[in-house]
Amino acid sequence: MGSTFESKPANASPDAPDYHLPVPLAHPDLTDDVRAFLDQAFPATLATLGADGSPHQAVIWYRLEPDGTILVNSRRGRRWPTDLDRDPRCSVAIVDPADRNRWIGIDGEVEEVVNDVEAAREDIVALAFRYDEADESSLEAFRTQPRVTYVIAMRGLHVHLDGD
């Protein structure tokens, strides 16, 4: 597994609660089949924790980065970015729409927050192209919104690619 820590991670906000959970220190190794699955533009569900500890889910776009992290992007003001700013822990579920028994679950933690609005806007534009949603009006809207990008480090994987 990895080591444990007795206080919040360095990238957590100052008002985040202390953690007492084992956290692997390294990214899991991504096999070729896992990488090939994550490289597809499937919709994903991101789960975060609210201030009161309640779970919250949102359907999102994502991109697997070459280093094995997951890039996600949102408009500022939504609940899940607010949750991640306070508590960097999250989970992501990605399901193959053609076979719902093929899916991958990711236990993750925000490793980097990109608050540079222009860079975050370019990230959402790239995601729009990835998901074939890059029409003129959506791109125009994305390029005017207050955006933020999160880079999520994988701390654990639940791989179900054989339909089991």
Image (spheres, rainbow, N blue to C red):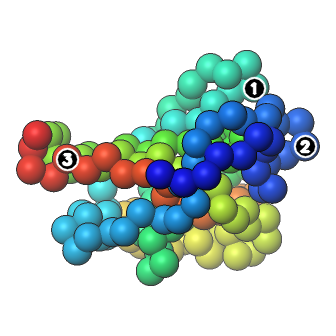
Tag 2 residue? 14
| Amino acid type indicated by mark 1 | Ala
Label 3 Cα crowd, 10 Å radius (few <14 / some 14-19 / many 20+) = some
Q: CA distance from mark 1 to mark 3?
A: 31 Å
Q: Position of residue 154 (x, y in %)?
A: 49, 58
- Tag 3 or tag 1, which sits nearer the N-term? 1
Mark 1 falls on what kind of element?
A: loop
Label 2 Cα crowd, 10 Å radius (few <14 / some 14-19 / many 20+) = few
| Amino acid type indicated by mark 2 | Pro
Tag 1 residue? 51
- Residue 67 lies, with reference to residue 152, above or below; the image says below
Of 105 and 56, the residue lying toward us = 105
Tag 3 residue? 160
Q: CA distance from mark 2 to mark 1?
A: 13 Å
Horizontally, residue 95 falls left or right of residue 53, namely left
Q: Nearer the viewer, mark 1 or mark 3?
A: 3
- Tag 3 or tag 2, which sits nearer the N-term? 2
- Tag 1 or tag 2, which sits nearer the N-term? 2
- Residue 46 lies, with reference to residue 10, above or below; the image says above
Q: Position of residue 124 (x, y in %)?
A: 57, 66
Instruction: Determine whether label 2 and label 1 are within 8 Å by CB.
Output: no
Give the number of marks. 3
Outermost residue, bottom side: 66
